[in-house]
Amino acid sequence: MKISFDKLQKLWSGQDDFRLRELTCGIPLHVVCLDTMCDDAKVSAFVLQPLAYMTVSNLKEVEKKLAVGTGVRRPPNLYSAIEDFTNGYTLLFDDKDDCISVDTRTVIGRSIAEPPTSMVMRGPREGFVEDLKVNITLLRKRLKTPNLKIINITVGKYTNTAVAVCYIDGIADTGVVNDAVQRLQSVKVDGVLDSSYLARYLDVQRTFLFRRVGCTEKPDIAVGKMLEGRLTVIVDGSPMVLTLPYLFVEDMQSPGDYYENSVMTALSRMLRFISVIASVLLPSLYVCLQVYNYQIIPLRFLITVLNASEAIPFSPLTEMAMVLIIFDILREANLRMPSAVGISLSLVGAIVLGDAAVQAGLLGAPAVMIGALSGIGLFTLPDNTLILSLLRLAVTFIGGVMGLFGVIISALIIVVYLASMQEYKTPFLAPFTPDIPRDRQDALMQRPVPSMKKRPKSIPNKNADRRD
Amino acid sequence: MKDRVNIDQLALLYLLLIMGGKFLTLPSLLAGDVGHDSWLSVAFAFVWDGVCLCFLLWAIRINDRSRLDISGILDKSLTKPISKLIMCIFFVIFILRINILLSDCYKMFSVTFDVSTNWIVYILPVILLTFFAVYRGFNAIARTGQLLFGLILIAVVALLVSPLTETDFGELLPIGEAGWDKIMLASFTRSFWFSDYIFMYFVLDGIQIKKHVFSPILISFAIGAILSILLNAIFVALFGYLAPDFDMAMSKIGVFSAASTTNGRWDWLTLSVWLISVFIKVVVFAFCAYKCIEKIVGGNFVKFNWAAAATISVTLLLPMFVSTDTLLDTVIKWGVIPFTLVQYLLPLCMPLLTKTAQRKTEVQSEQS
């Protein structure tokens, strides 16, 4: 649509933050900006002050003479002009409906701090913030190379959210980059309020169980992933930066892993892996062993369990289901409570509810212990806690009804599902299946950084050699 | 490609398939046929399997140039009606093998794990797993096998090693007591349990071949054969003349393991892990049966075909009407000849058939 000052004025008529200054500096000029989105000092310093001492014959001359403003551009149509305007640019119109925009955006947002979800003992403590520009700066600070490429896209009919796709040219696979950019460009949505909105569009197979797009709040992690051939998607207004392609094994990796001793890292990862498997299977095994196959349990242990659950009025399945559901309720409540109340709630849940239930003979101590152990184990994979919790409940139910047979079948269905997932030329369970020996250097085990000379094969990349 | 699989995955899957079906009722059936020489019957069966496998691998190597599927090869080399007939025989083999595997598993769960239920409730989850896996593609099945392979192998080795101290291998002597002709005949009549390589026919066009086609698969075959022979030998050595009465070899061997009532039956957990390989075998054979229907009707199922899945599901109700023993007797009486043709004769002819089909394809493409 053709640029027109009258149309713009009509669109914003009646809005209190719409500011208009009529100036004459050789030609009549309409200077408009949104008071709520612009920095008054910038409007004054970059637009009004220079114009006060300027005499021009057309807007093109203004564009050339506004040397103090760093971001001066000419929007090609009305939509671009409105986009700039709503982003905090000041627009200058002449009487021929010609227009230029000057960057006078205000910087409102929190300062860079350590992200609460990715705290580390050692390593950088900077975290992404909600501002896209700041986030790109954090990446540029770590990647001082012209090969860092950024593709800018705008998504959302009403929110016009700025999205930046960042990758390292020469490492990232062009096919993957193009695929992701095409997907983002084809997004038809009224608004994008967080990067998680776009994660759903970037998930090619529309998987509903496991997360298929990674996210991080730490620029060092994002850069580390880009150096492996991944691309990052930064969304204005979100401190969560998306990374893709994404592997299941990334869930086992913690931000601090690369700054610690590799042996310790390997041990921690193994522990996380075992705890996740145990968390999903332990309640179901407990129930089906107690109901059907108690012979597997050593005699002394069995006697202890039987003594503890003798007076319980519920079946082992009901008992375990109650424990798991109570634990999930407590977790949900804890997430939504202010932190001070949350601690009290945890105490009430853990001590009062658990202990009281055992004392009252409603729940057995072993069931509470296994439920709690399984619940805590799930938190070693904080991003997938909820879905794993649901799977655990489902497997427990099937195990309680069908015994070991049910547990085997449900575990196999989950594995087949995971093994079948493949997006952006990357199998979800790589490097375990398909087996990629080279990538096992940074999977459950971790080799010391100097000996990781190759980039992961499971992530498509143009340059496999890290030293090249 | 949904059904592409690399040679390593194929090799591991093949090993899982070898381990999956032979440790249920087969050892006791063979012990009934030839007594303590049953392990020799197994060894002879594996010799035949090995020869046929080599020819099939040769065909796979030849087929790498043209990537024809099984019906493509058979249609062009043996005409379409014969090709469809072979597919029908394969379909019957797969359905029977799935049914026998499932009914053996059913028996194992009800006898060993005290989980008694009716057949329909038992097979419903299996059908769900099977067709979910078929829907996800052969690649997903192969990857699942690759992922769980280590775990299953450890479980099998643990189950075999644990009773070794109690095993008196002197029970196997004198070797060949049942008579060599009887031993050979037993390996022939029980051949229904062998030739697990037949699943490879149905992924012929999707195998990614590397430099060494033969070695990973032959290593898998050798390991599988050794484990199977060893299990049979341990089984008859442990139970002696009572072996034919203990129809669930794997679970009964566990009785002699280091586990006791005080320590708990930990061998049952390893047994459960091993059972995963049985279900993987069921899934693979169901995939092949599904492919058979695809080839018989002459179509190419781009999307998941519910009618084919329903047909296979209905055939899984067979054990509700016919007992496993009757089924096996019928198989041995009527099926052994046609089954042997596709299990043992077809692989020997496969290199020649593949070459013929390739030549015809090339001529056709030149003419067009």
Image (cartoon, coloured by chain):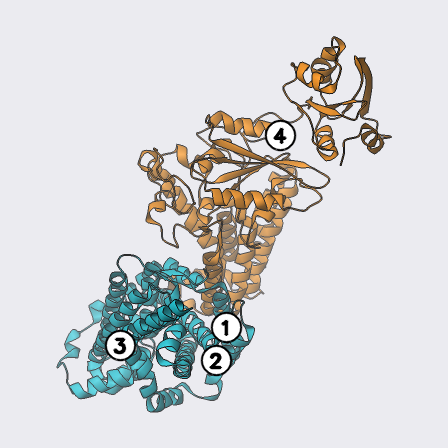
Q: Residue B348: give its label.
A: 3
Looking at the picture, tell me which residue is in the foreground, A35 or B72: B72
Q: CA distance from mark 3 to mark 4?
A: 68 Å
Outermost residue on the top side: it is A53
Residue B165, picture quadrant = bottom left
Amino acid of disc 1? Ile
Residue highlighted by disc 2: B316
Q: Find out whether the residues at labels 1 and 2 contact each other: C-beta distance under 8 Å.
A: yes
The chain letter of the orange chain reads A
Whether discs 1 and 4 lie on one chain: the answer is: no
Amino acid of disc 2? Leu
Question: Split into 4 quadrants, where in the image is the C terminus of chain A?
Answer: top left
Residue at the (67%, 40%) spot, across then down = A193
Instruction: Please name which of the two marks, 1 or 4, marks the residue nearer to the observer.
Output: 4
Looking at the picture, tell me which residue is in the foreground, B273 or B358: B358
Residue highlighted by disc 4: A131
> Could you tell me which secondary element the residue under label 3 belongs to?
helix
Q: CA distance from mark 2 to mark 3?
A: 31 Å
> Could you tell me which secondary element the residue under label 2 belongs to?
loop
Q: Earlier in the sequence, mark 2 or mark 3?
A: 2
Left or right: B126 with respect to A59?
Answer: left
Looking at the picture, tell me which residue is in the foreground, B343 or A215: B343
